[in-house]
Image: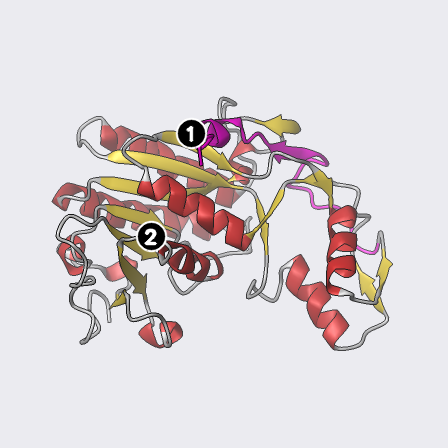
Amino acid sequence: MGGAICGACTHVNNNLKENAMKVAVTGASGFIGRNVLNALLEHHVGIVALTRNASRLSGLSKKISIVEMDISHSSPDCFHQLGKPDVLIHLAWDGLPNYKSLHHFETELPRQYQFLKAMVEVGLPSLLVTGTCFEYGMQSGPLSEDLIPMPQNSYGYAKNALRRQLEFLKTIKSFNLTWARLFYIYGEGQPKNSLYSQIKDAVLRKEQVFNMSGGEQLRDYLSVEEVARHLVQLAIRIKDISGTINICSGQPISVRGLVEQWLKKNNWNIELNLGYYPYLDYEPMAFWGTANKFKTFFKED
């Protein structure tokens, strides 16, 4: 079904004014993607949701056009199939949460780059791509965008390589590029293997104990709704904002402290079995993002 457009969705919001911004979103049916679509609905923009399976986006607002396309087999005309958007918010990435899999740079990296390059070469003026805090590698403490990336797992390496490839592409093809480096995210609808979903499911199953790590590692967490709002803010003003920007709270919190917040907020009653799992070997014990760059751009918002 690569490159096919859903029959009723061949145009982007015809009721919008001719000069209204058009925003396309890849990975639209994913955890972050669905929240980005909701955040975009708060703005006067045309919205195109790109997905491999249109049935996964049933029930969306009629203001959102759905394009069914597999970016691995997209046609050279993909930019026009998406309604010639002004901005592409690129969230799609397969192979997670296995961060160590060679799939990320052997398979995912080349097909991601080829799709984005095709979009840019045909006329895409602005591109917002989500990166990852794993690009920073094992560096500890506050992580600013000025730090040299030192990825230590396959996923972080592939993401950082994609950023570099797009930066080289910019030297021969003019387009706006913003790289939004995501930290840790939680919220409703998150995949079952995430910490938030696991503890919620354990509570719903009325389990008495929840096994987890020692929980003393410091991380940077944002709700998925807030992450989506930040991404949309960047997309709307992408002509004024370029380069790499951390999407983070800027405030470290222990994993144990965060879980205890969830328990209190949701009135969940379950005992934490701390230290059951070892700490991950591809993350430092303490790191968080600096949010100064983002706050500077949006200090008036």
Q: Is residue 136 magenta?
A: no
**Closer to us: 203 or 265:** 265
Q: Does the magenta stretch include residue 283?
A: yes
Q: In this view, does 140 lie above or below 17?
A: above
**Closer to us: 102 or 147:** 147
**Closer to us: 139 or 46:** 46
- The answer to whether 85 appears left or right of 205 in the picture is left
- The answer to whether 29 appears left or right of 282 in the picture is left
Residue sitting at x 43%, y 62%? 34
Q: Residues within 10 Å of mark 2 (few under 14, many from 20)?
A: few
Q: In this view, does 161 lie above or below 87?
A: above
Q: Name the residue under label 1.
A: 297
Q: In this view, does 45 lie above or below 293?
A: below
Q: How crowded is mark 1: few (under 14 residues within 10 Å), some or many (20 or more)?
A: some
The numbered mark at residue 43 is: 2
Residue sitting at x 56%, y 36%? 152
Residue sitting at x 78%, y 58%? 264
How far apart marks 1 and 2 lie (CA) works out to 18 Å
Percent of width and height locating residue 127: 29, 42
Q: Main secondary structure of the magenta part?
A: loop
Q: What stretch is highlighted in magenta?
A: 276-301
Q: The residue tagged with tag 2: helix, strand or loop?
A: loop
The disc labelled 2 sits on which kind of residue?
His
Percent of width and height locating residue 95: 47, 57
Percent of width and height locating residue 208: 86, 71
Residue 181 seen in the figure? yes
Can you say which quadrant of the picture contains the N terminus? Answer: bottom left
Q: The residue tagged with tag 1: helix, strand or loop?
A: helix
Percent of width and height locating residue 261: 75, 53
Can you say which quadrant of the picture contains the C terminus? Answer: top left
The disc labelled 1 sits on which kind of residue?
Phe
Q: Which of marks 1 and 2 is nearer the N terminus?
A: 2
